[in-house]
Amino acid sequence: MMRRVLVFLAVAGLAWALLPLALGSGVPEAPGALATAYLTDAPADFGAANIVTAIVVSYRGFDTLGEVAVLFAATAGVGALLTRKRLGLGDAEPEAKPAATEILVTATGLLTGLLVMFGVYIFLHGHLTPGGGFQGGVVIATALLLGLLARPESHLSHGILAAVESLSGAAYVGMGLLGAFLAWGFLDPRALPLGRIGSLVSAGSIPVIYSLIGLKVGAELSGILDALKGDRE
Amino acid sequence: METGILTRIGYALVSLFVITNYGLLLIGSMARISAKVQGRVGQPVWQPYIDIVKSTAKRNSIGHGIMFYLGPVFRLAGGVGTYMFIPAVYGSVLFRNFSDSGDLLLVMYFIFFGQLGMALGASEGGHPYSAIGVSRGLSQMTAFEVPFALSVIAVAIQYRTLDITAIVAAQQGGFWNWTVATNPLAVVAALIAFLGMSMHNPFSIVIAPQEIPIGPPTEYQSNLLGMLQTNRAIFNGAKLVLYMNLYFGGATDIVTMVVKTFLIYFINVFVGQAFPRFRVDQSIRFFLGVPTLIGIASVIIAAI
Amino acid sequence: MSLLEFVSRINPVAASGAVLVLVGVWGVLARPNLFKIAIATSVMETGVNLVILSTGYIRGRTAPILDSAVAGTATDAAGAAARMTDPVPQALVLTAIVIGLAVTALQLSYAVRLRAAGGGSSIESYGDEKW
Amino acid sequence: MVNPLWLFALSLGAAFLLPLVDRLGRRIALVLVHGVTAAWLAAGLSWLAVLLSGGEAAEFGTAGFRAPLAIVLRVGLAEAAGVTAIALTGLLAAFSLTRSLREAPLGGAMALLMALMGLSGIVLTRDLFNLFVFLEISAIGTYGLLGFDDRKPALRSAFKYMIAGGLASSLYLIGVIYVYRLADTLNLDIAAAGTALSGPAGTAAVFFLLAALLVELKPFPANGWAVDAYETAHPGISAILSGASATALLLALWKILPLLGPAHLSLVAGSGLATFAAGNLVGARQDRPLRMLGYSSVAQVGLVAAVAALARLGGLGDGGADFAAAVAGGLLLNHLLAKTGLFLLAGAVEDDDARGRLAPLSLAAAGVLSAALVGLPPFPGFWAKWRLVRALADSGLWWILAIVLGGSLLEAFYVFRWLGLRAKGEAGEAPVRLGIRSAGPVLAALLLAAAGALAGIRGPVPDLLLWAPWAAAAILFLLDGTPGWLKGLLSVAAAAAFGAAAWDRLDGFRQFFAVMLLGGGALFSIAALRKGGPRRGLHPLLAAATLALGAILVARTPLEFFFAWETMTAASWLLVLRGRGGEKPALSYIVFGLGGAFLLMAGLAAGGWDGGIAAAGWPGLLVLVGLLVKAGALGVHVWLPGSYAESDDESSGFLSSALSKAPIFALFALALSLGAALPGGPWTSRALGWLGLATALGGALYAVYQEDIKRTLAYSSLGQIGYILLAFAAMDQAGWTTSLYLALNHFLYKSMLFLAVAGVIQRTGTRNMYEMGGLIKKMPVSFLSVLMAIIALSGVPPLSGFGGKWLLYSTLIGKGWYLETAVAFFASAVAFLYLYRLIHSIFLGQPKPSQANVREAPVALVLPQLVLMAVLMAVSVFPRLMLDPILALVGDRFPAAFVFEGTRLRSALGYWDGTLTMIVTGGVFALCLVWMLANLHNPQSVKQFNIVFAAERPLRPETTHYAWRFFEPYRKALGFLTRERAERFWDAFGTGAASVGGALRRLYTGNGQTYALHVVLYVAVLYLLLGVL
Amino acid sequence: MSDKKGKPVPLANEGLPAGERGLFCDAPPREYAPAAKIVEDFWNWARSQSLWILGFGTGCGAIELRPLMTSRYDMYRFGIQPRPTPRQSSVFVIGGYASVKTLKRIVRSYEQMMGPKFVVALGSCTINGGMYWDSYNTIKRIDQYIPVDVYIAGCMPRPEALLAGFQELKRIIRAGKAEGQNEYARNFEWYKANQKRVIKDWNMPDYNW
């Protein structure tokens, strides 16, 4: 009983702390000086139509690099934790999971290709249309997830996923270094030609970076999903 | 030194001879008086002389080691030394002894010298009774020293000095100048302490004759015992002279010294006859009780 | 400050985000099941993401992407800027979402690992180290 | 300046490629990981080199843009130091982690790499959101690391760790976004410059940032999850957590300080102090070492945070910035290295589940690390704590000062308790060999020593003489394998050299004490040659303690004095710990020693600064009380008997005769610096007089009932110190002359007693008096020396002891302290009891058959005794030899009370002629001796059983030697005075503090959810407090 | 009893177990020649005037000693007083029959007295066994075991008789004929043989210093 009161008090205290912020801040009329600077300079600096992508990949590219590292560490952690040996399954045959329903199996056949193509589209057009590497990666991961659901006993080949992850990550860091040598700073997309705004090949190395991120995120998420299945060797 | 060193030694020896004979006769006469109290004829007054001669005349003796032999030497040296540091007769060069080597504190602490020596000798004897005797003696000594110290402090405050000759000088001129008149409480405390010091009856547990055969000197015999008996006389004499000087106006000549010391010792013996023997812890509690309060009172009186 | 004026100043997205955060925190504190804690944490993170987005929400403006919807010609950048919302929170929230995902994944895998080790799925049974 | 971005690229590249590299072999992968950490370390060191040699901080933008648009990294002095520290801790921990990293899946190595990179990122970045990203990278790395080697308890605490981490990150995110919303920038410097954050919403936004960081810094009520992690994780990881991540988070807090308003700062300070106090209180109740170290590191981090906040809040110290850097930086560096080393060491011991004694090298490392952690000299923690205490005293924050000092004392208690256990080990256990795993802690210890020495020599204590003790200890420790006599001579030479070097710098007063302190040290170094063999550890400590005493004399400024004082305390504590039964007494020795030293430190800090230890008014009283605790006045003497009795015979002799004079010297120095007066006016001297008297009487009474020789001597020196204090308290020429005379005398005969007793114990093998007897025939010289010593100590006339008594009583009566005189007289009579008992039960009485073949004490003991006997006899015959210099010393500070006429010393009250007394006594003694020898007829020397035993023969020597409970009647009479009141008081005090710790401990219920509740409640309470402040 | 160089041969002390022989002195008793005539006469006079009796009461005679301390008989007049230890006493009063067990203690105490020492035997039991003449465990003639100076006949002589006995002892001492210690030393073997014949569990040194 006492615990319940304390929990309520804690949540109420937190609410009281959030009150002035969440409520007091109201709806901003106009973006701040920094935002306006981004809005005006981004197309000019990098020729990228999608300003958010410009911020994410170039201006605050270091954040994104860190974020990719976070995801990478999480995948490694999950992989290390949920090995068959660690879970104590040993070589015992995992208990048979219920076979996928017939609808799922046929839908998987149809949708997998489509999803993968759609994912690739998203991260290729990161600098033009909303979305980018992360969103594309997630879509690809769902495609692979569908595969896992359709055939529960199947495994994604751990080797390929790991290779894709590593290489795309290393390539991303390479692109960053490229920016440092060819352009004005680490992770500066202007290492490659900016091209015309709006066209597919434009905004320097942003699309390249974003597609690398897409591949990496796709591989990692599917790796996590496969590990969470619990029967990885 | 106005008188040569040799003459002073000569005077000291004479003074020592006087006090030794006086001490022995005092013990002899006191024994005779207590015998008269018990209705006995009592031993002749010069009996102590005979006893000493007989002990010294013993044909053989045994010894437990060097410290055993040195015990009586320390003891006798303690007794003689204490006497040497006290000016026996006020104003006389003969009886000045070597009192110019230290004041009252030296005398008070020199008493320990004899006791320490005796204790060491007794322990070397290896007899458990002597060790028990020494333990009791020392325990009692710490207790009765407190009232004695308090009365000495009272005297020191009153006369603003620790030099015995000066104290005696301050008490000259009739009874009313004596400490016993000016600060009676101090004298009472000192006399009670004197009882403990001379190990008379209420506090004679240390040499309780039947319980632990005469305590520390159990193993002593022949000439060593003789020395202890001589010391008993001299040491008593020295303490009596000290008390006389501090509390009873000192003495300007031999006769008054003999009379006064005799009377002081008489009080002591008189009390001794009437009391049974205290246990050690009882005597400690006794000394740290009323006599100490009396001593403190005397100090307060003197200090005001 | 009248009630009406107070209500008008509320940013609806921020408010709902805050509520989600509180629900998440309450979930973490109240439900002993490991998995529910993990889920409650992700609910809290979603709430936070909503709060982040709320600061970028400006009425009457569209997504900060230079395409036909925003500007006729690609040249008058200032005019386009006037019609776009604040891109920064959207960039930040992207990172926050991914990090939230990573933490939740790791937390779930710890929960699975703990349950597999036979400790049951209630947090009370994992209290050996104490005092 | 190396651009940090290359390093990040390197780390991330290595991380991403690790799975591929792992295919080539795990060993290569680990080399890569350690290589990256080494690269970070090299970069950090290069930055430090550039910055320390005058370069300014540099900023590094990303993506080719400057501050507001892009993320900026900044490399200043703090950042460089932070990165170096993180990389160093990472490397040290990596060594111990290598074996388990090799066995565990690759995730562990990945997590380690990520964690260290994240921490470095936290330190370097200037962008708030980027700080959040790096916080999360290090968090994820830590979660991975906690569970990497599949320890079940570690998995449990990892989950709890994650819950708290998730809450903290959400708070941070909310904070960041509203800071952006209000200040319209994510860059720290720009946000701090603007005033947008000062409004109510701004304060709330910054509050969320602060709350997140504070939760990460594991504040008191909300750190259950952290302590579980420290306890259960692999020790290497705990080292990273407590060392590296704490450093990074503290630097992050340091970075956002400019954003914080006064209300926030006081929150940080309050929470930090509460964490420090509570952490130490609960730490004292721990019996598992790793959990104890967890609480200790939480406490230390809290203290550093509080100091940083206070520096900024109240302008603590002179300028805030560089003061905070010096103090907080010093404390952090100290905590960092010490904690890393201790975690690695304690962890290695726990892993082996070993309970024996530590091997010498790792024991030395453990000693250095725990001493550094507690803040003993010469480690960086000491300098930092001194400046902190001084600043706190300056700005009058007394209750904070009390918390800081109280907390460090508690920490000293439980850290040294652990060290004592490790130094002694449980009975019968084999010594613990750690092998290579002790490399990390030893390296950390060396770094600490180097850093401390460097900070000291370049900073406040440049005088090399004061560093002599540590140098001597180091050299002799290196030579510990060589034979004992060589080391003994070396330490004597060191003492002599120190004396020669310092002689001309000392005024007459200090020269007097130098003779005793350095002389005593040399004397007992020689005495230490009594036993063959290397006697590992004794000579270095003895030499260090001796030179520390010398250093106390040489010190001029309060800090130098305090530095030497604490060196002396540390060295003597180790000496006591070295004794066979030394564990428990050593603990009480160091706790009381440090307690006294902290009082001293507070007093010195508060007092004035002109040379020496000038401290008038009540700071002076603090100094006085501190010195009394060290001198062992009654009431705070509980540490003294155990330490003197249980340490080796030479060291107990050294402690009692030489070291006990240091507080006496300090008292004189204190009085001299106040113009020959005591702080607090006349009633202080009267109170000190009564305290000294109580100590004298108490010491004597306790000593009478002891069965163990060394305990008797310990209480006896307690009593003699009481006399010296009493005389000193008289505060006039008579009093000071007596005090100095008694001190020198006490040095003489106490050394003789301890040397003789050492010989007796070595020969008979026991310390109980009743198991000995009749040794006079076998050890005549020792007997003679003990005889002369007890005659001198009890004040029996011919020897110099009586001079002391005479001076004392003349002073007291002259001063009008009549009651004190009587009690002093009683105490000296009681002293006579235990002295006689000492010589009776050892040398006289019935010899035991088992001790039939006992030989005289070794030459190394007998020779010094003969020298001391000669000196004592010379001083007894010619008192002017000792009194003239003392009278000159006390000189004209007071109206003259004693004057010499030829050989007779005259005072207002009476006179004493030492030479004539000796002549008369000698003459009379000779007379009686001749008389005895003349009348001795046919003496027959007989054996021990030829005694009159009521006409029976004695049965066994053991039953006829009366020694056990020698003064039983005395106990019946005055036993009630010696019931152990002081001991009971301090035990009650100890259990009281422990119960508070116990109550606080109840908060940590082990349930992860409760810990989360604590976190949220903590944040809520902080917010309410924010509203109030 | 002394070997060639005049140094006395140490006693064997077989009565003692081997381990304890070192705890006791093994020197035999010696004869101590009296000093020059004039000095010895004076010392004998002093010895006679200060007779210290050892407080060792055996048999029924001891009770006769007590009245001497009272006012009626008052032995202090003659310089006689009781002493608790043999070391300090010079007269050993054997008050009546002495059983074998008591004889062992008598011998030990007698040997621990310092010379010159005198023995006064009371009652007929010490002369010829008295009424215990045929008892198996009493000593028939005490002077076969320790030298006796004065016998006081009577089956328990009254205190007056004791005083007369002491006057007689004084006379003997003054005459210099009370050399019991030397006589004991001279015929030590004889005395010791008689004693050992009677005392079975010896367990003490041959001569108790």
Image (cartoon, rainbow, N blue to C red):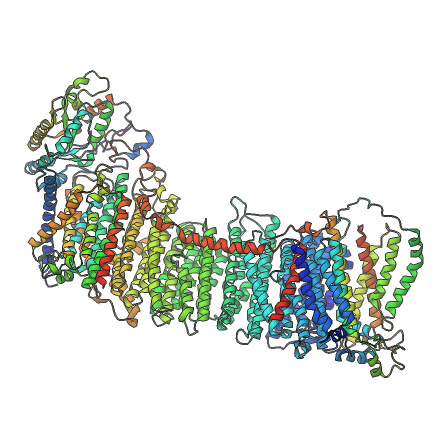
Q: Nearer the viewer, residue D653 or D988?
A: D988
**Residue A67 occupies which quadrant of the picture?**
bottom right
Query: Is residue D918 among the parts visible in the rendering?
Result: no
Asked if residue D192 shows in the view, the reply is yes
Question: In what quadrant of the picture does the C terminus of chain E appear?
Answer: top left
Q: Residue at x 37, y 63 (%)?
A: D664
Residue C111 pos. (x, y %): 74, 53
- The image position of residue A228, as x and y in percent, is 79, 54
Labels in figure, total: 0
Q: Residue at x 78, y 70 (%)?
A: C12
Q: Residue furthest top?
A: E134
User: Going by the picture, which residue comes out furthest to the left?
Assistant: E38
Q: Tell me what residue is drawn at x 12 percent, y 22 percent.
A: E154
Answer left or right for D663 relative to B292: right
D415, above or below B42, in the image: below
Q: Is residue D643 above or below residue D618?
A: above
The percent coordinates of residue D652 (x first, y second) are 40, 53
Residue C31: image quadrant is bottom right
The N terminus of chain E - image quarter: top left
- Describe residue E57's horizontal placement relative to residue D702 as left or right: left
> Residue D782: where, in percent of width, then height?
32, 49
**Image: D107 above or below A182:** above
Seen in the picture, residue B63 relative to D352 is either above or below; the reply is above
Asked where in the image residue D1023 lies, by quadrant, the reply is bottom right
